Image: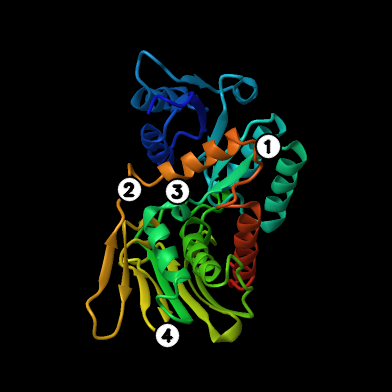
Amino acid sequence: MTSDPLFRWAVIGPGGIANRFADALAAVPGARLAAVFARDAAKGRAYAGRWQPADAPARVTADLDALLADPAVDAVYVATPHSHHGGFVRAALAAGKPVLCEKPLVTTHAEGAELVALARERGVFLMEALWTRFLPAYAQAARWLRDGAIGELRAMQSSFCFASAYDPAHRQWNPALGGGALWDIGIYNLAATRWVLQQMHGGDCPEPEALDVRARLAPTGVDAAVEATLHFPGGVTSQFRCGFDAMSINAFEALGSRAALRFPRDFWQAESVELVRRKQPVEQVAAPFARNGFEGEIAEAQACIRAGLVESPRMPHAETLALLRWMDAIRARFPQP
């Protein structure tokens, strides 16, 4: 744990998801929390005090320029509401600071392309924090898919739903904070769809030929629930539902001609994967987190930054932009509020 030089992270937005990030730092060699940007000083100090020992305190500041100019910060993790990602990412890249940004990177393909262009122009690392791709369960699933264990892919089915009390001020329901189920959780259904297709097509993901979309809007105008079917070449489909209005087991299945591959529960944070064959016992492989699941994306970002890369080969810019393009296309079919 101490053999690697320190890698010093600054957190922008010390909210709920940033706690999981800070907790995972303990499982990544060299990683430590060095600084926190928070407009609410008390909140920032509480966060820093929770995750950094008193003998090595993290600096808390409301001065973004000073934080981004600090040579004692190696990279920043952006964990604000979606609506604020773009501004913070843009400022960090302009200052030459590598960025790991919570998903979605931003809320439109156009803005995503602008940020990717800036990262490439400045030669500064940028990665969307789609942590699912780095989980041990997905490594096992990739081996099955690439080895032909399911045969020919026919379809995918998934859900990501939980019941959330309606509160127009909460980020989930507030359009000014980038609210809506598709951006917040449906991105995982789409990311898993793309990931399976990539395993089955040597790394490439075909574009959907058609989309069927139904969305139910909340009184604030954001999507409370989305049901969609994506139609791909060869008759392959991916059906999913995401929403803040219902409870679900939140499984993901890839249906093949020989077998089904299944993440049986909470697929975006899966700790096991199953291969289901007709008239045979289910083959299940446990793949627990080393810490809480975020450690994989943190280790990937650190390795890429130390190698001088501007993007991760496992979560490249093209993948982020493709997800934004698909979400733009789905949202274009929403009813008008």
Q: What residue is pinned by disc 1?
A: 124
Disc 4 from disc 3: Cα separation:
44 Å
Q: What residue is pinned by disc 2?
A: 289
- Disc 2 or disc 4, which is closer to the eye? 4
Q: Horizontally, is 45 left or right of 82 in the view?
A: left
Percent from the top left, x then y, of residue 211?
59, 78
Do the CB atoms of the residues marked 2 and 4 lie less than 8 Å apart? no
Q: Nearer the viewer, residue 167 or 330?
A: 330
Point 64% across, 31% down: residue = 97
Disc 1 from disc 2: Cα separation:
29 Å
Percent from the top left, x then y, of residue 120?
73, 43
Q: What residue is pinned by disc 4?
A: 257
Looking at the image, the residue that sits furthest to the top is 55
Q: What residue is pinned by disc 3?
A: 170
Q: Horizontally, is 255 left or right of 64 in the view?
A: left
Question: Callout 2: helix, strand or loop?
Answer: loop
Question: Callout 4: helix, strand or loop?
Answer: loop
Do the CB atoms of the residues marked 1 and 3 lie less than 8 Å apart? no
Q: Nearer the viewer, residue 37 or 75?
A: 75
Q: Amino acid at mark 2?
A: Phe
Classify 261 as above or below 124: below
Disc nearer the start of the sequence (4/1): 1
Do the CB atoms of the residues marked 2 and 3 lie less than 8 Å apart? no
Q: Nearer the viewer, residue 331 or 35?
A: 35
